[in-house]
Amino acid sequence: MKNLLKLEELFMFALTIFLFSKLDFAWWWYPVLLLTPDISMIGYLVSPQIGAGTYNFIHHKALGISIFVLGIILANQPIQFTGLILFGHSSMDRILGYGLKHSDSFQHTHLGMIGKA
């Protein structure tokens, strides 16, 4: 089942690349900005609870989808691109086993514990 979910995430990640190719940006913008959502981890400098909150908000796929759709409604490609980066980054993280965080530690995710026991 775990591999099936990773495959699903891979297809969602590929969808963001396809949709990005339809926007008027140079190809290199996507890989350059793909890791920017991880800035949300800065909340962990305050506490695990704040860190989980900021991380989960930015890495929630509904946020990326909502921003992308807002960009379509407003016919604004930078907003669409922002939504694609958020959604694509979240899919990439889940392929790698990084899920939404519980408030006790960064390693405790909805996909299980990160790292070896």
Image (tube, rainbow, N blue to C red):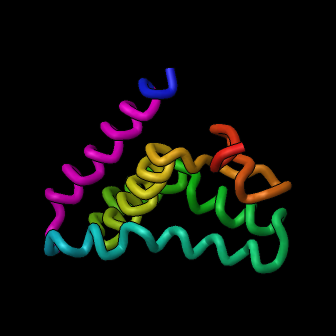
Q: Is residue 10 above or below residue 5?
A: below
Q: Main secondary structure of the magenta part?
A: helix
Report the residue at 61% width, 71% height from top.
Answer: 40
Residue 44, position in %: x, y? Answer: 75, 72
Quarter of the image for the C terminus: give it.
top right
**Residues in magenta, as a range:** 5-25
Report the residue at 53% width, 55% height from top.
Answer: 63
Q: Is residue 112 left or right of residue 35?
A: right
Residue 17, position in %: x, y? Answer: 24, 53
Which of 91 and 78 lies nearest the eye of the viewer?
Answer: 91
Residue 4, image quadrant? top left
Number of labels in the image equals: 0
Residue 51, image quadrant? bottom right
Q: Is residue 9 visible?
A: yes
Q: Is residue 96 magenta?
A: no
Q: Is residue 18 magenta?
A: yes
Which of 42 and 65 lies nearest the eye of the viewer?
Answer: 42
Q: Is residue 66 visible?
A: no
Q: Is residue 109 above or below residue 55?
A: above
Residue at the outermost front position: 117
Report the residue at 32% width, 65% height from top.
Answer: 81
Report the residue at 66% width, 56% height from top.
Answer: 56
Residue 54, position in %: x, y? Answer: 69, 66
Residue 70, position in %: x, y? Answer: 41, 59
Q: Is residue 50 left or right of residue 82?
A: right
